[in-house]
Amino acid sequence: MKAILITLLTVLTAFAAAGCTTNPATGEKQLSLISEEQEIQLGREAAPEVERQFGGVHSDYGINDYVARVGGALVAECERPYLPWTFKVVNSTDVNAFALPGGFIYITRGLLLVMDNEAQLACVLGHEIGHVTARHSVDQLQKALGLEILIAAVGTGTDSPDAEAVARVVAALTQLKFSRDDEYQADELGVRYAVRGMYNPQGMIDLLGIFLALPSTSGGTLGDIFSTHPDTQKRIERVRKILKDDYPGVADNPMYKANTAEYRTQVDRIR
Ligand SMILES: [Zn+2]
């Protein structure tokens, strides 16, 4: 009984402390009952299992450093730059990328090998950064598991994280499917961060074109960017419209780089 009361009190305190806020990236009102600190902890708890399922972090320091440098240039331009962002290359041959709450971003070796330039890489990383800045995975977790399990998974001042709750969060995160609107929004934010980082946003259209040309099994079971929901062709049309309406002339402006030669040199390390 006492445990139930404490849990109830914790949940009520969380309600009072968090509540309705405006997301800095999307400008939308969000009912965020999980604090930023808790969001980071949920991501941190799930990171080892996600790395394991993706075949482990790639052992080449150089490629990890390169991806982290491109990602770092984008997060400097995003609305939540102070999160503990990490960017890692994982060994999987699947063509995919993945983001955990709090800013833990993964890209597969398989995806790096099918892309042609740094602008495309920036657009993939920008898409994943967008899921984090918009708090998509925390929202989906709250809906899937309920607040009580999330609170139990991060623990409270008096209780350490509950192992069973952590396991449920990790399982939910690895099976998470974003809504169609979340995917469109992540594409839009990805273009925003790529452009702010002085990358050519045509990279997003090229990237989606690469996905269209791949067999449908290429994305594997775990991952995000290769999602066939929504339809890739529709995503391309929406990105084209965003470039035309919000960034006229940017894709033709040589100031916005693609860095093709540098990208090839870097990716040759893992070919
Ligand atoms: Zn996505």
Image: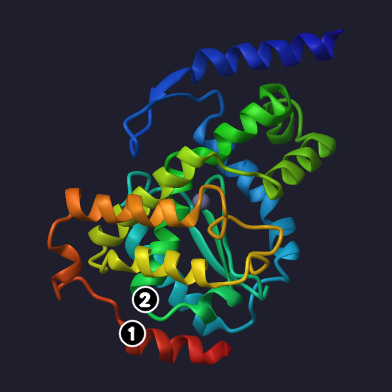
Where residue 210 appears, as percent x and y from the top left, is 47, 72
Q: Which mark is residue 260?
A: 1
| Label 2, ligand 1: CB separation under 8 Å | no
Q: In this rendering, is residue 30 above or below 250?
A: above
The amino acid type found where label 2 is placed reads Glu
Q: Quadrant of the N terminus?
A: top right
Q: Is residue 77 visible?
A: no
Where residue 185 appears, as percent x and y from the top left, is 40, 43
Q: Nearer the viewer, residue 120 or 130?
A: 120
Q: Is residue 159 left or right of residue 136?
A: right
Q: Quadrant of residue 118?
A: bottom left
Q: Is residue 69 left or right of residue 168?
A: left
Where residue 148 appears, as percent x and y from the top left, is 71, 22
- Marks 1/2: CA–CA distance: 6 Å
Q: Nearer the viewer, residue 236 or 60?
A: 236
Q: Residue at x 42, y 89 (%)?
A: 264
Could you tell me if the residues under marks 1 and 2 are in contact, i.e. CB atoms within 8 Å?
Answer: yes
Q: Residue at x 50, y 51 (%)?
A: 231
Q: Residue at x 79, y 34 (%)?
A: 165
The local secondary structure at tag 2 comes to: helix
Q: Quadrant of the C terminus?
A: bottom right
Q: Tell which residue pokes out farthest to the right in this image.
A: 1
The amino acid type found where label 1 is placed reads Thr
Q: Quadrant of residue 59?
A: bottom right
Q: Is residue 233 visible?
A: yes
Q: In this rendering, is residue 140 above or below 108?
A: above
Where residue 78 appears, as percent x and y from the top left, is 33, 50
Residue occupied by mark 2:
118
